[in-house]
Amino acid sequence: MVGYSPFDNATLRDHDHDYGWLLREEPVSLFQGYDPPFHILSRYDDVSAALRNIEVFSSHQGQGPRYTPPSGMVCDPPMHTLHRSLVQQAFSPGAIRALGPRVEAQTAELLDAVAGQAGFDIHDDFAFPLPVVIIAEMLGVPGEDIQQFKLWSDASVEAMGAEDPTPWLAELQALGAYILGQIRARRADSNPPDDLITRMVLAESDGVRLEDEAILGLVSQLLVGGNETTTSLITNVVWRLLEDRRLWEHIVAEPALIDRAVEESLRFDPPVLGLFRTTTRDVTVRGVHIPRGGKVMLHYAAANRDPAVFEHPDRFSLDRPPRKHLSFAIGVHVCIGQEMARLEARIALRALAARFPDLVLESRGERIKPFFLWGRRRLPVRRGGVYR
Ligand code: HEM
């Protein structure tokens, strides 16, 4: 083994192929196979410390491997503090709890649609539309456009991971034009609908209103960032449980275990394997020098397998004592949508287990492309498994 590569075929197939080696042998690893090259931090303590040290590990030049301008909440304070405060309320624990009945209804509608079929696709028919419909309603954009959101969302994440984003620019411009249209329609409306975009349009901080471009950054982050990830969470947890069908049978028999299954899936198969920061000065981590302006990947998925923190880290276990995984990050950028993602995944899994205890995996499907994300593009299942 010469070194860790996130692009290695075995790693692309099974993200956790090499974490043991990485954590043990090269906890601060320089990856030269990308332009620009980047360092990878993998140990739990190092990733946590970097997440807390925002003066040195900055988000102002993007959360992907390339340098990109600040946008939405991908930036440092004070811009970050202002932007986050504007949408925080919509994601408060009370606001998310209130979404429960709507998520239940949407879940039931999607499962009703496939109930008469011998087989269906967990990704296409269920895990993909569920979060898109919910966030579209919250923002106040028409839910019928979800196939279009899917194309835009794919383009955004592919562009974020690519050395050359040119092939996706037209899609990204179309997404931007669509959201700007939504913002301008509300500005022009004397009685705009009560939704999250309107609230951003009307929000004031010290008498200053947000410009269209700033709202555009926030809306696209919510519309794109939260969907692909929640889809992956639902798809990943169903996949792991069905792959070892004893686990599936366990949660069917004991639905109280579902919250644990979701949390263990987040630890074991994080939808976001890692994100990037840019150093604001030279810094040394475990004796390795990282120059100012260097890109650093904070490897959340590897940190979740650190044996210093998690016993038998490579085992998917429903009896794990609660311990904070890093799949939603920590610190000022901690995922604002984490309770929404948990709510949707728990409701989705509860409904699936209750209605289709006889589910069987047809195949493990194919992973989604960007190297720092982890999810299935499809997950075909069929009914008719024997339930003991
Ligand atoms: C399982 C699902 C999800 C995962 C794994 C996930 C993961 C993450 C991670 C790792 C971060 C930290 C970003 C960083 O390191 O710079 C983050 C931030 C964020 N997430 Fe999520 N997320 C999920 C669902 C959602 C949902 C449902 C929404 C909203 C609809 C959302 C909106 C955001 C936003 C706006 C931020 C930026 C927060 C900030 O920088 O202050 N996420 N998410």
Image (cartoon, helix red, strand yellow):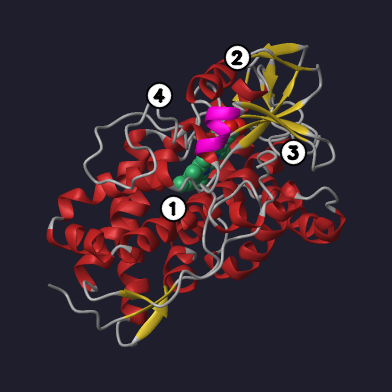
Disc nearest the viewer among 1 and 4: 4
Left or right: residue 372 compared with residue 178:
left
Residue 130 versus residue 379 in the image, above or below: above
Identify the residue under disc 1.
233
Residue 49 in the image, given as x and y percentages of width and height: 54, 16
- Specify the label residue 36 is tagged with: none
Identify the residue under disc 3.
65
Mark before the other along the chain sequence, 4 or 2: 2
Q: Could you give the CA–CA distance between mark 1 and mark 2, rounded to whole angstroms? A: 28 Å
> What residue type is disc 3 on?
Pro
Tell me the SS state at disc 1. helix
Query: Is 76 colored magenta in this rendering?
Result: no
State the image quarter where residue 279 is shown.
Answer: top right
| Residue at (49, 72) in percent of width and height | 124
Disc 1 residue: CB within 8 Å of ligand 1: yes
Disc 1 to disc 4: CB gap under 8 Å: no
Q: Is residue 185 among what the camera can see? A: no
Q: Which residues are magenta?
A: 20-25
Tell me the SS state at disc 4. loop
Identify the residue under disc 4.
308
Callout 3: 10 Å neighbours few (<14), some, many (20+)?
many
Residue 6 in the image, given as x and y percentages of width and height: 66, 46
Q: Nearer the viewer, residue 125 or 86?
A: 125
> What residue type is disc 2 on?
Asn
Identify the residue under disc 2.
53
Tell me the SS state at disc 3. loop
